[in-house]
Image (cartoon, coloured by chain):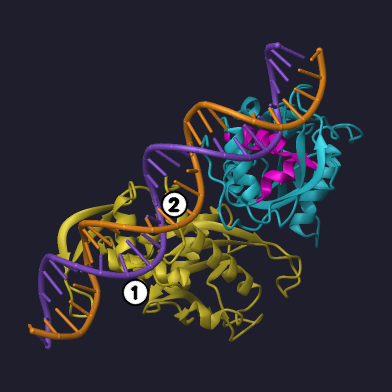
Chain colours: A yellow, B cyan, C purple, D orange
Amino acid sequence: MTVDVVVFAVLDGALAVLVVRRGEDPYAGRWALPGGFVGDGEELLDAARRELVEETGIVGDGLALEQLKTFGAPDRDRRPHRVVSVAYLAVTPHAEATTAGTDAEEAVWRPVDEVAGTLAFDHDEILATARERVASKLEYTRLGRSFLPPEFTLAQLRGVYEAVWGLDIDPGNFQRKLRSARDFLESTGASAKPAGGRGRPAEVFRPIGEPFDKLATPIFRSAM
Amino acid sequence: MTVDVVVFAVLDGALAVLVVRRGEDPYAGRWALPGGFVGDGEELLDAARRELVEETGIVGDGLALEQLKTFGAPDRDRRPHRVVSVAYLAVTPHAEATTAGTDAEEAVWRPVDEVAGTLAFDHDEILATARERVASKLEYTRLGRSFLPPEFTLAQLRGVYEAVWGLDIDPGNFQRKLRSARDFLESTGASAKPAGGRGRPAEVFRPIGEPFDKLATPIFRSAM
DNA sequence: ACAAAAGTGTTGCCACTACACCCATGG
DNA sequence: CCATGGGTGTAGTGGCAACACTTTTGT
């Protein structure tokens, strides 16, 4: 019984995933998702969070963790005993604050498009499932905010949607749609310095409402 | 490692679930979801289908099975060893053809509203999760058809949506919405006898397209 | 003829896309 | 003053809910 965790972040406008280099025998040297065995009497969710912190030194705070799917094909692990893995999906705003201070193993952020198809075990399949899931969740939950710090601008949030969905979104329409969404955003009144140095300063927002609850009116995936 | 299966059907206009009476010790005599231990080297999905047939004698054909969620709280089973269960969700048109010819245990269809809150183990939680999932799936997949035989009328299909969502749907609007949905229905040209004996005969349809794939345009949950 | 269920027409409303346009800042 | 990004206005389109209406059967 193991847990594997797919952690996503948006880095440089691209969807990135946290991967670790395996040190031990099955697939030694290959990249894999962080994860490991579930302790006796340990909650699955706790195991996922623990493995993540242990293997990657990621900041557990602000981490949105959710069960993704269980992978249990009898031949999914080369080792003699059967290994069933519960995969978790996580999203974090703290993409910078990882890798440092971990134990031995290397943990790095990599663009999803680059690692897809190269991972150990059946982790490619897990990653693909996670990617679909997170794209869906952006539509009908408030998950998108979990990619960002506690205060952010609409342009930053738009960047998240664009990175995950892989399409360009009309800034004006995105603005209206998100401002009018109920229990999603709250203005702080403050202004942020413009992104590229130039441009009008943006209004700063704060999340309101539960990130995993369903939205009354979804945010549809389209160019807008 | 176990699997539990939530099988839904629509009976007499209400969402019904298949439950079995437990014969053995933990929760003996109580109602529970069908399920059992996963065999060595057995695929999880296969285990779910096998347990279902063994315990309920249900017709495996035409059964839409999908992984729901994994329940692994350390104290979810009273027995000394830990039991992690992968829950599956199934939907069937063959609600009549069960119960008969099974081995010993009693398997019956019960309205979900009646059994909710009375099941053994954490099966109430599993049932609640399944109920939410199936309601969602009706919106953005073609799953609704899996409640019906290979040929059916739009009135029957509307009955499924009404039962699962617990609301009344305008027949005219439902008609148009489903007829215009792409890769969903195909007319057979035939006519069916009217439901209550009276009324105009209905056109008979056949499913087309994959039941689990996402719809291009969702069927929204509303009174219509 | 009447009731009941299937199916079609119609109207008003609202959300969304596309795109033009103003606002506020840095250089 | 120009470039750049933030934010608002607006017109056309399309989908949808509500409900009236026609069609086709059984009694």
What is the x, y in percent for residue A52? Answer: 47, 67
Residue A81 drawn in magenta: no
Q: Which residue is mark 2?
A: A218
Name the chief secondary structure element in magenta: helix
Q: Secondary structure at mark 1?
A: loop
What is the x, y in percent for residue A5? Answer: 52, 66
Marked residue nearer the N-terminal end (1 or 2)? 1
Dividing the picture into quadrants, the one containing residue A78 is bottom right
Residue B155 drawn in magenta: yes
Asked whether, in this view, residue D1 is left or right of residue B195, the answer is: left
Span shown in magenta? B142-165
Asked whether, in this view, residue A164 is left or right of residue B58, the answer is: left
User: Considering only vertical position in the picture, is B173 above or below C22?
Assistant: above
Q: Nearer the viewer, mark 1 or mark 2?
A: 2
User: Considering only vertical position in the picture, is A72 above or below A199?
Assistant: above
What is the x, y in percent for residue B151? Answer: 80, 43
From the viewer's side, name the closer residue of A159 and A152: A159
Asked whether, in this view, residue B92 is left or right of residue B67, the answer is: right
Whether labels 1 and 2 belong to a single chain: the reply is yes
Q: Secondary structure at mark 2?
A: loop
Q: Residue at x 44, y 52 (%)?
A: A218
Q: Amino acid at mark 2?
A: Pro
Asked whether, in this view, residue A79 is left or right of residue A203, the answer is: right
User: Considering only vertical position in the picture, is A74 above or below B61?
Assistant: below
